[in-house]
Image (cartoon, rainbow, N blue to C red):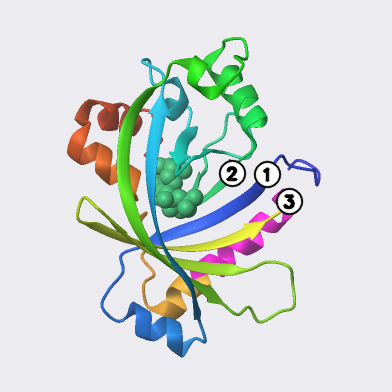
Amino acid sequence: MAPSSHLSGSIEVERKFVPGPEVEKSLYALGAELLKEIIFRDSYYDSAELRLTLNDYWLRKRGDSWELKHPPQPGTRGLFGASTQYLEVTEEDKIICKVSEVLGVPSPPNMEAFGLNEFASFVTRRRRFQLPLEESSSTMAMVDLDEADFDFAVGEVEVIVQTQEEVQNAFQKVEEICKKLGVFQESAVQGKVATFLQLNRVEHYRQLVEAHVF
Ligand SMILES: Cc1ncc(C[n+]2csc(CCOP(=O)(O)OP(=O)(O)OP(=O)(O)O)c2C)c(N)n1
Ligand SMILES: [Mg+2]
């Protein structure tokens, strides 16, 4: 394993779940607090050859801000069993740098100059809960209950860590929380993007399944 390193973003360890009718009750019973309710549009982009997503790179515009999610180690998958770990990059110059690397093109002056295509766009209504963690550490557990505008609901338990060494512990933590909430499922639960593609972009979805990204 790579030594502790300064990453260009935080590592998001997440596990998705199907939100049953009891999940909110379970959240409050565990001492969760509703932090915020937000509505945002995500628009996802890729090259014509789907170079980003076939490499598990997820470039989106959330509201007015660019965001890039990708596996922490190049050449690996962000998927870990039914949980995921992704680095999230939000600084535009770093995003430009990474995207040009994956596309194999020189860095342009701005994101628009890549000439990428939008392949998915949808609005999410998110309720974000914060869960108290037993030990006194800098990590936080968040639970998101998302409803997308294409009639799809999904939940997510998320723990943010700063180094690769903390990832294993975070995987355990998100599993434990799912179990306590009564939403633990062995197999991976499909998220909004995968579901959107399955419904609207069948060929793109097929290629991602074939490449073992989904
Ligand atoms: C279970 C699973 N999830 C995602 C992927 C691929 N993937 C990785 S990142 C990614 C982009 C979407 O990330 P996701 O966490 O699903 O969306 P959202 O919850 O709106 O973003 P957040 O607010 O948490 O940043 C995808 C599809 C996969 N292969 N398998
Ligand atoms: Mg997520």
Horizontal and vertical percent position of residue 84? 50, 50
Please, what is the three-letter code of the amino acid marked with disc 1? Gly
- Tell me, for residue 88, which label it has, or none: 2
Question: Which residue is at 19% across, 35% downward?
Answer: 200
Residue 213 is situated, as x and y percent measured from the top left of the image, at 41, 35
24 and 167: which is toward the camera: 24
**Kind of element beneath mark 1:** loop
Dot 2 alpha-carbon crowd within 10 angstroms: few under 14, some 14 to 19, many 20 or more: many
Q: Is residue 70 left or right of residue 166?
A: left
Q: Quadrant of residue 180?
A: bottom left
**Magenta residues (range):** 163-175
Q: Position of residue 152 (x, y in %)?
A: 24, 56
Whether residue 63 is situated above or below residue 118 in the rendered picture: below
Give the structural element (helix, strand or loop) at label 2: strand
Q: Which residue is mark 1?
A: 9
118 part of magenta stretch: no
What residue appears at the point 52 percent right and 87 percent down from the top-left corner?
31
Q: In the picture provided, is 172 more to the left or to the right than 162?
A: left
Q: Quadrant of the C terminus?
A: top left
User: What residue would you read off at disc 3?
Assistant: 163
